[in-house]
Image: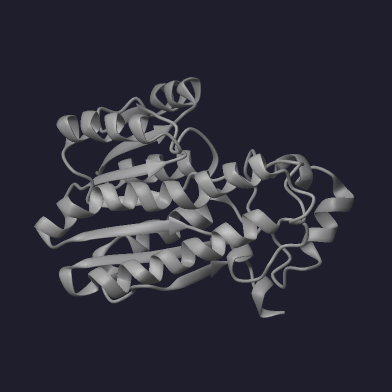
Amino acid sequence: MSRVVMVTGAASGIGAGLASHFISLGDRVIALDMDRGGLASLADQLASPNLLPAVADVTDDAQLERALAESTAHFGHPEVLVNNAGTTGGPQATTLHETPPDVVDRVIDVNLRAVIRLTAAVLPAMLERRRGVIVNIASVAGLVAFPARAAYSITKAAVIQVTRAIAVDYGHQGIRSVALCPGMIDTPMTHWRLAQPALREEVLARIPQRTIGTVSDVVCAAAFFASDEARYCNGAAIPIDGGYLAI
């Protein structure tokens, strides 16, 4: 049965992969991102009437409200929400005392507040149907702190707790929530680092499988946990890291 799936941060990387994969499953996908050009490229690439680009900054309440209203009018209320949009904060986001307050605020706004806002916005319709799935893209950094990535690690840990809170508060009403925790995945955000042989070897040395994850690794996991086959999976944080956390 075709579902309505909303994916944030859908213009590139994991988000674009998620949009493409859910469409391949027959779902109708609301692809939300602030990158208008990236969404246009995705639409050209997929050329599917089941893709609805929605331009919005996840940190802007008015833009989110408008995008949700317009997309709902077109496709209906989301039955699956994938909170994928995220940011590391860039080179200024390091240790706590060295990260400028405005950078900390931006990381919190994108990685945490946007997840809370959008989830709260889609929950009423899910509760009315007594059915819905929230998939939050967290990180292994939410389970173990990454050095000199304080704001990122803190927000991803909080996203995992949001996932648990949803399971506890809404599980008895047919709502599931799962946090996926990717390790090192080859995306446009990380490719610059992985393209440097020395840095790539340094990363691989910490991964028991000695391989870098792909967008497909995350996408396939998200599709499974969003499906009825995972109906008893709720409130969990699932590492997708090649064994990184096992060391």
Q: Left of 158 or right of it: where is 56?
A: left
Q: Left of 74 or right of it: where is 99?
A: right
Residue 165 in the image: state x and y as whole percent: 36, 70
Nearer to us in this view, 76 or 109 = 109
Nearer to us in this view, 85 or 228 = 85
Nearer to us in this view, 21 or 88 = 88
Quarter of the figure with residue 142 = bottom right
Q: Residue furthest right?
A: 198
Residue 119 in sight: yes
Q: Left of 38 or right of it: where is 233?
A: left
Residue 102 in the image: state x and y as whole percent: 64, 40
Q: Left of 246 or right of it: where is 127?
A: left
Q: Residue at x 47, y 39 (%)?
A: 9
Where 74 sits versus 238, above or below? above
Residue 234 in the image: state x and y as whole percent: 33, 73
Residue 212 in sight: no
Residue 154 in the image: state x and y as whole percent: 60, 61
Total numbered badges shown on the rendered structure: 0
* Picture quarter with the C terminus: bottom right
Q: Residue at x 29, y 34 (%)?
A: 65
Q: Residue at x 10, y 57 (%)?
A: 129
The colour scheme applied to this rendered structure is: one colour
Q: Residue furthest bottom?
A: 246
